[in-house]
Structure formats: C-alpha cells, structure tokens
Amino acid sequence: MSDTGTTIVWFRDDLRVRDNPALHAAVLRGDPIVCLYVLDDESTGIRPLGGASRWWLHGSLTALAAELREIGLPLTLRRGPAEAVVRGLVEQTDASAVFWNRRYGEAERAVDAALKSSLRDDGLTVDSFQGSVLFEPWTVLTGQGGYYKVFTPFWRSVTSGSPPRHPLPAPASGADAEPLHHRRLDSDELDSWGLLPTRPDWAAGLRERWEPGSAGAHSRLRSFLRHGVGDYVDEQDFPAEDATSGLSPHLRFGEISPFEVWHAVEQHRARVPGDAGGASAFLRQLVWREFAYHLLFHLPSITSENMRPEFDRFPWEKPSRPELERWQQGRTGIPLVDAGMRELWETGVMHNRVRMVVASLLVKNLRVDWRVGEAWFWDTLVDADPASNALNWQWVAGSGPDAAPYFRVFNPELQASKFDKHGAYVQRYVPEVGTDAYPEPMVDLAESRRAALDAYATIR
Ligand code: FAD
C-alpha cells in the first residue's frame, strides 16, 4: 500500500460493488478508501427523489452497506448539498483522490464539473468513469455530428459499432484476499433520513414485491433468462403475464450495471440459440434506456419542456383536484386504466403497455399536460428515472422527437381486448369491475378523442 492519502469513492446511481469502475479504480490505487453516499435534496436544480424512490433508496443503501462490509469497507452516509459535503469530507480525511461514476442530468453534471475543477485546483486526483450507460452520449453521433432524435437509427448505430465492454469483477474478499484499507468515519444513521413512509405506511405492496439491492437484481436477471426471455417477443405486451425482466428499478439505482445485463443476455443467447429472438428484442428495450439518457444529456430541457415547440401552444385543460385524483387513484371507471394506476400504487411499477394507455388517457382524452402525469409517476414509481420518464411521457403526448403521432389515441377498451383478453390483469387490481361499486367512466372515450384531435388541429 502506498501512503499518499485517502481515496473517496462517491456512490450515486451505481449502488453496487460488482462492475463499479470508480470503486475498481480506487482499489487499484491501493490507498485507504472511504465509500460515501450523499442524500442531496438541496443543490440547485437537483430534483428530490419521489416517495417510492426514497423507499427504494433505503433498501438499496442497506444492501450496499452489507456488500461493502463483506469486502471490509464501511459506507459513510452524509446529507446536504453534495459539493459542500464532498469538500468537507476531503478536508476531514485529507483525501488525495475522489472517484465517481458519471451521471447525465444537467444539474448533476454542473455539480460534478464544479467539484472536479475545484478539487483538481487543490491538487487532488479526480476521475469519473463510465458506469451507468453502455455508450457515452458524446460517442454516438449522426454523420453530421449531431445526436440522434429517432430511435431506430440510434439502435442501428450502437449495434453496428464495438460491443459494450465486459463487466469488471467485484474487489476480492475473504480470507485469501489482501485486506482493503479503509477509514471509518462518523456517518448518519440511515433511519434518521426518514426515507421510509410511516404514517400511513403505504409500502406493504412494495416490500412484498421487491428486494432492492444487487442480490435482488441478479436473482431477477437469472430468473428472467431462465423463464422469460424465450417468450419475451410473444408475451411482453400482456400485463397479466410476468413476462418482462422487472429490472428497471435495479437499473435506475445502478444495483446491476447495463454491462452486466448486456453480457449475461449475450451469453445466454450463445448457449440457447432458440432464445435469440427474445434476447434481441430485450436488448433493444435496454437500448431505449440508453436513448433516453443520451437525449437527457444533449437536450436537458426534455425533463420539463416540450421538445416540439408547437406544443407550447396546446390548449391543455386544468383538471380539478377530484378529477385528477380519479386518475391517480384508479377510479376513472375505465377498467384497464384503473388497473394500471392501482398496480402503480400497490407495487411501485406498472406494465409498459399499460403505462402508455394511462398516459394517453390523461394527455389526450382528459387533455391534461403531460408534466402533471410525469410528476405523479416521479412520485410513485420505484423506477422513476429523469430520462426514461420524461422521454416516454413526451412520446405518448406527441411532443417528443421520436413520438407517437398525436392522432394515435390509445383506446383503453381495445387495448384491454387485445392484451388482457380474459380480464386477468383487470380482475387482479379492480375486482369490483362489473358490480354497482364500480363508477361510470369519467369521460366518453369517443367524444374526448374527437375533442383532443380538434385541440391538436389548433397547433398544427
Ligand atoms: P423490460 O421489458 O424487461 O425491459 C428491460 C429494460 O429496458 C427496462 O428495465 C428498462 O431499463 C429498459 N426499457 C424498457 N422499455 C423502455 C422504454 N420505453 N424507455 C426506456 N427504457 C426502457 N422506465 C423507467 O425505467 N423509468 C421511468 O421512469 C419510466 N417511465 C415511463 C413512463 C411512461 C409514460 C411510459 C410509457 C414508460 C416509462 N418507462 C420508464 C419505460 C418502461 O415502461 C419501463 O422501463 C418498463 O416497464 C420496466 O419494466 P421491465 O424492467 O420489466 O422492462
């Protein structure tokens, strides 16, 4: 071990030990390591996590601390504006290096860039690494040097170049391994952050469904490769089936890296050629996540502004509070929509097809601004992700670059007859459908569709 100082590894959206390039580099450096997580609700422009994500974060940090403990590293928790907290820790530990894996939101990049330059000015080694996306946004460009605004050429471009790198191993642990040197520091108690709901405790369904942390992520991936990927093409659109991977919150918090997922799927494809179709379709979905992050990087306003400026003139309706609550709480009287909204409340996720249907009802039939729906999803999804959430809402609204055309208004009844033919999904979440206890639809689907198209005609 050298005695040049301490290396701080600042964990953010990469709550894992395996395939963690920042941690890997710190271990290679050989100095004592401080592992840090900062709960930052205060830096300008950084959007505080929603309720469901905070619940997830609590579990994820608990799991990360246990994983780190196994390799002899404590996790230090601090709360506050990240720049001040990291600077404070550098002084406290007399650190000589700070490492992190990159993030792609505008406010987050501003914090990281300011910190990097001031710490470097002070003579520290500061390095950032590629840990959360398969392809860096500045490496995937069109022939003209711009970024892709349409998914299919983006997909073609990333799959025609070199494949993503292989995952890095976890630092060694156990009796035979060299002990990792660390500094033990005062740390916040995780419980003192109040990330878990108490009054009321709405998280019972989340606890039942999820195991935050890398172990839960890898177990989902294994199970999906064994039982799901082969039928992915045929079954991914049927919400009653457990046919998709369920990896989105694990990817959101970086408990598993996209590199690990990519290569596990590739190895599976080589071993089980019959599953090749499902494997390709699944990797394509994984690349939608990349596409969203690239757009977030190149066009940060995607989180809050219409990508198509004509939508700034769209005559949105301002819903009354009770109307909005009918949508939020799954009491619209439209069974597939209500099932989706209740699935979201109970489990912290909603099937992708149903997400499109509930979003379409809100922005088209009810003509409510997509940002209202995006905010509700931000608060209630465990996979709420600044890039994917905004991109998909804009896709459904028609205001995005690679969007569904506005006149494509999902008909929830038709969608239910195609994708939930026997009503199994609706029955699971809305058992009172068909009884007097179930409300009448809050809108006439045909009439509101016509009104939506008329409204759209005013901005074309
Ligand atoms: P799988 O089908 O197993 O797909 C594998 C992975 O690919 C997912 O885990 C996810 O990381 C990625 N992926 C799949 N579909 C998409 C997509 N359309 N866009 C971006 N990435 C995708 N996904 C989020 O991760 N966070 C969000 O906040 C989010 N908000 C959404 C909002 C709306 C209105 C809609 C229509 C979709 C949204 N999605 C979001 C995309 C998608 O619904 C989820 O990623 C998917 O349902 C997660 O389930 P899964 O992990 O089983 O997916």
Image: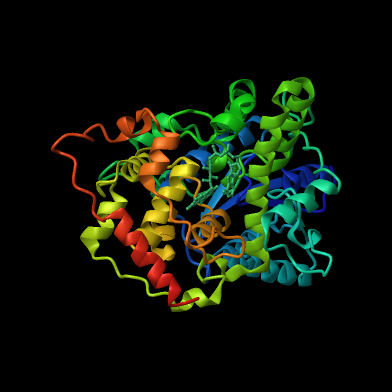
Q: Is residue 333 left or right of 3 when viewed as pictured?
A: left
Instruction: Give how far across and how far down residue 209 sits, in percent.
Output: 43, 31
Q: Identify which residue is drawn at 68% across, 41% down.
A: 257
Camera-side residue of 285 and 172:
285
Question: Which image quarter: residue 104?
Answer: bottom right
> Relative to residue 63, is residue 44 depicted above or below?
below
Q: Is residue 294 left or right of 425 when viewed as pictured?
A: right
Question: Which image quarter: residue 72?
Answer: top right
Which color mode does the image show?
rainbow
Residue 198 appears in the picture as rendered: yes
Instruction: Give how far across and how far down residue 377 sits, in percent.
Output: 42, 53
Question: Which image quarter: residue 89?
Answer: bottom right
> Quick check: which quadrant has ligand 1?
top right
Q: Identify which residue is drawn at 82% across, 49% down.
A: 3
> Relative to residue 77, is residue 261 depicted above or below?
above
Residue 368 appears in the picture as rendered: no
> Relative to residue 138, is residue 271 depicted above or below?
above
Camera-side residue of 400 and 203:
400
> Relative to residue 131, is residue 218 depicted above or below?
above
Q: Residue furthest left?
A: 436
Q: Identify which residue is drawn at 48% across, 38% down.
A: 59
Instruction: Give how far across and how far down residue 87 sits, in percent.
Output: 64, 64
